[in-house]
């Protein structure tokens, strides 16, 4: 389809000229003939090669997401006025912002001062926090989707590929991701759950580009860029000044090593004022630490880029693909486990049934995480992370350092925030060498009891949740029992 003028939409919106095009469609300058004002219209294009059922699912999903974005009233979010279903496709009517995208500003002015970039980041962060509070993930934060208006306002636009928390309909399918290589968080590329931390990672990549004049993981080929996001450490920024440590923390490979929204807001405020940023211990250690290179075997994760017209699809190894061969975890080195054990094998079926009745284990691709349940009633997740020696430190000391960093980060997040409430850390006895627990209550009234503990060079997280407005004694008791069973099993193997 070319860029010929579309018909008058809903009897009032007349397209005047195309303003730009991307992988998901075309943006038009248009006139609202009813109110006599100019607006922008996003024509969302759905790949024609998809089956009709799939196209219909995507159309319905996009309509719901656009309507959800229309409810987000915020000075840093481009206002959505209307959503129209025409010719089997969604059309999104928005404010017409007169100005330039951040991408255009960078190309025209070169690298921007750290203070200005931090101020831009603050505006976008506030917009994302509101969206996340409503359960909406943007999923495409990048310089072209941030507008700098002629009067100096910073606005986040294009929620066209956003996801709504709890929606089980995938916009792009299990083996396809929509987004721009270099701005897609590692957990999304791995096929893991992408929540607010993924959007904040994309914001970090965007701010890095603004202050350095180049994207942190840019390569000549898209597939090489994707590989760099997954496996390469973030290049140390040379122009960022006080913003540098903040960017390195935001771009940590693992979501739990990144600063949360509240901590990030304080850090950006400090940089915008020309002062060094104060980061919590987890984020500070992440920014100082040179990231380990992630071994990415083709049997474990296959990344391919297929281009069809203007739309890009990133293919990842799906659930049916053969996993990479794993070392036998029962063997141990002098300092701990030689490899992480399969978390699905750490709990006997009887113990699982006592917590989540009639639930089969569901491992993730790399078998570092196992889920049971997933119903609205009860859900259990066990995650095991293996650490090796680093910089002359034995592996159990490295694992202990990560444990302390994680506890410090949780303690910094205690209180009520945009996503719900984090309650104070509790002591746990009889579980591992080091351990702590805490509760989370989300805005959709789901209660979590989380237990984090260490057994030699392994960090284990037990995450048990129920649909409730507050954690119960039974929830905590069951989570502690699960943690103790796993701890005993690991001790028996080591």
Image (spheres, helix red, strand yellow):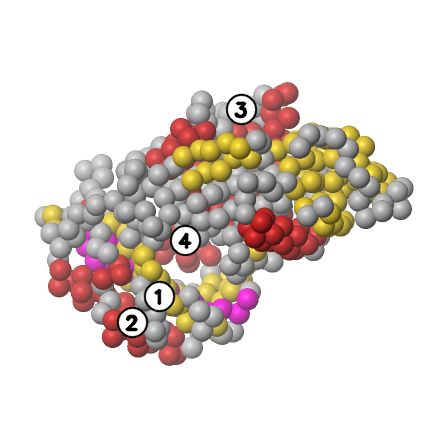
Residue labelled with disc 2: 352
> Is residue 21 found left or right of 221 in the rendered image?
right
Determine whether the residue tagged by mark 3 lies in a helix, strand or loop.
Answer: loop
Mark 4 / mark 3, whichever is N-terminal: 3
The residue range painted magenta reads: 444-461
Disc with the residue nearer the chain's start (1 vs 3) = 3
Residue 166 vs 46, above or below: the answer is below
Q: Name the residue under label 1.
A: 372
Q: Mark 3 points at which residue?
A: 213
Q: Image height check: is 334 above or below 447?
A: above
Whole-Å distance between the Cαs marked 1 and 3?
45 Å
As helix, strand or loop, the secondary structure at mark 4 comes to helix
Foreground mark, 1 or 3, reads: 1
User: Sequence-wise, which precedes: disc 4 or disc 1?
Assistant: 1
Q: How crowded is mark 2: few (under 14 residues within 10 Å), some or many (20 or more)?
A: some
Secondary structure mostly seen in magenta is strand
- The x, y position of residue 191, in whole percent, is 41, 47
Asked if the magenta segment contains residue 455, the reply would be: yes
Q: Which residue is drawn at 29% across and 53% down?
A: 368
| Residue at the spot of label 4 | 409
Q: Dots 1 and 2: beta carbons under 8 Å?
A: yes
Q: Find numbered disc 2 in the image and state the secondary structure of the residue it sits on.
A: helix
């Amino acid at each position: 389809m070319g860029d010929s003028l579309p018909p008058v939409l809903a009897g009032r919106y007349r397209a005047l000229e195309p303003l730009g095009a991307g992988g998901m469609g075309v943006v038009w300058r248009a006139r609202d003939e009813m109110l006599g004002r100019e607006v922008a219209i996003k024509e969302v294009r759905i790949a024609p090669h998809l089956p009709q059922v799939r196209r219909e699912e995507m159309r319905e999903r996009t309509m719901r997401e656009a309507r959800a974005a229309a409810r987000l009233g915020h000075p840093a979010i481009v206002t959505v006025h209307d959503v129209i279903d025409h010719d089997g496709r969604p059309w999104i009517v928005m404010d017409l912002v007169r100005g330039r995208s951040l991408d255009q500003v960078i190309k025209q002015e070169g690298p921007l001062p750290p203070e200005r970039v931090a101020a831009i980041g603050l505006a976008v962060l506030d917009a994302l926090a509101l969206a996340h509070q409503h359960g909406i993930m943007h999923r495409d934060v990048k310089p072209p989707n941030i507008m700098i208006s002629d009067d100096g306002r910073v606005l986040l636009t294009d929620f066209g590929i956003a996801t709504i928390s709890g929606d089980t309909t995938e916009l792009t399918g299990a083996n396809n991701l929509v987004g721009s290589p270099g701005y897609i968080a590692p957990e999304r590329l791995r096929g893991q759950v992408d929540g607010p931390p993924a959007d904040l990672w994309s914001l970090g990549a965007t701010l890095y580009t603004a202050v350095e004049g180049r994207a942190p993981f840019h390569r000549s080929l898209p597939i090489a860029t994707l590989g760099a996001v997954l496996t390469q450490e973030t290049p140390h920024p040379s122009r960022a000044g006080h913003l540098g440590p903040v960017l390195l923390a935001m771009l940590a490979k693992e979501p739990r090593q990144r600063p949360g929204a509240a901590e990030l807001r304080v850090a950006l405020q400090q940089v915008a004022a020309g002062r060094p940023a104060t980061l919590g211990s987890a984020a500070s250690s992440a920014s100082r630490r040179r990231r380990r290179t992630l071994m990415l075997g083709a049997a474990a994760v296959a990344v391919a880029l297929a281009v069809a017209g203007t739309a890009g699809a990133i293919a990842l190894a799906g659930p049916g693909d053969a996993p990479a061969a794993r070392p036998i975890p029962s063997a141990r080195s002098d300092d701990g486990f030689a490899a992480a054990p399969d978390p699905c094998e750490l709990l006997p079926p009887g113990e699982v049934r006592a917590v989540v009745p009639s639930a089969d284990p569901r491992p993730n691709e790399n078998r570092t995480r196992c889920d049971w349940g997933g119903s609205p009633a009860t859900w259990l997740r066990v995650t095991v992370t293996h650490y090796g020696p680093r910089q002359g430190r034995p592996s159990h000391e490295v694992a202990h350092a990560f444990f302390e960093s994680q506890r410090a980060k949780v303690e910094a997040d205690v209180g009520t925030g945009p996503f719900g409430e984090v309650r104070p850390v509790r002591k746990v006895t009889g579980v591992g060498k080091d351990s702590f627990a805490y509760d989370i209550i989300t805005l959709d009234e789901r209660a979590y009891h989380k237990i984090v503990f260490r057994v030699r060079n392994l960090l284990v997280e037990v995450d048990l949740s129920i649909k409730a407005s507050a954690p119960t004694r039974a929830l905590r008791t069951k989570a502690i029992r699960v943690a103790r069973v796993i701890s005993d099993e690991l001790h028996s193997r080591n």
